[in-house]
Amino acid sequence: MTRLPGGPGESPGFLLWQVTLGWRRAITQALAPLELTHVQFVLLACTWWLNEQAQAPNQQDVAAQAGADVKMASEVLRKLEARGLLERVQDSKDGRAKTVRVTSEGVELAREAIEIVEQADADFLGTHSSALARLLRQMSPSPARAAHSATSS
């Protein structure tokens, strides 16, 4: 039994769960025509962003930027490489690591996917988008908070 008088409908965690499921369905549907999963999109977009910042990230850097598990990220990056969307090259500084670079085909797909995802976000979140982004940045333990702080200073 919940201690909330109105039941689970008053639980922030339960409401977040429900909203997150709906949002993930919307993003999955939006990305389907591009034949990208949500995780593939996030890792491709993060790699492209890091490349655009003149970085040659390794797989661990990309996973950290995305807030993803390193092993899972490695597997997904391998699949993106097989599609010709990025290249993984042995890191000259660390023989155990691979640096990651988005190919020209990957850049085109990343740009298209980002536009589609941003529109799906806008459609799903509507007028709540900016307020929710501010709240989530305050709560986020991820690199997104640091990245935003660095660009807004």
Image (cartoon, helix red, strand yellow):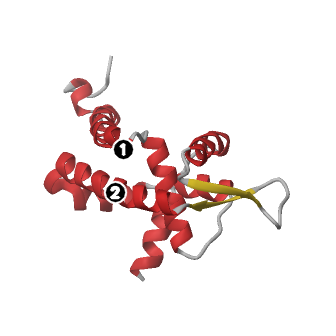
Q: Give whichever of 73, 16 is nearer the camera.
A: 73
Residue 18, x across and y down, in percent: 29, 32
Residue 80, x across and y down, in percent: 55, 46
Q: In the rendered image, which quarter contains the N terminus? A: top left
Give neighbour class at mark 1: few <14, some 14-19, many 20+ (Cα, 10 Å).
some
Identify the amino acid type marked 2. Glu
| Left or right of 42 on screen, residue 112 | left
Label 1 with label 2: CB-CB less than 8 Å: yes
Residue 118, x across and y down, in percent: 28, 56
Q: Is residue 83 visible?
A: yes
Question: What residue occupies the far top of the structure in this picture?
Answer: 1
**Circle 1 SS class:** helix
Q: Is residue 138 visible?
A: no
Identify the amino acid type marked 1. Leu
Q: Residue at x 60, y 56 (%)?
A: 62
Give neighbour class at mark 2: few <14, some 14-19, many 20+ (Cα, 10 Å).
few
Query: Which mark is on residue 76?
Result: none
Q: Residue at x 51, y 56 (%)?
A: 142
Closer to the chain start, of discs 1 and 2, is 1
| Left or right of 63 on screen, residue 21 | left
Q: Give whichever of 23, 38 is nearer the camera.
A: 38
Q: Residue at x 14, y 56 (%)?
A: 127
| Left or right of 32 on screen, residue 73 | right
Say which residue label 2 marks.
112
Residue 78 vs 10, above or below: the answer is below
Say which residue label 1 marks.
34
Residue 44, x across and y down, in percent: 50, 54
**Circle 2 SS class:** helix
Real-space Cα distance between discs 1 and 2?
A: 9 Å
State the image quarter where residue 69 is shown: top right
Q: Give whichever of 129, 61 is nearer the camera.
A: 61
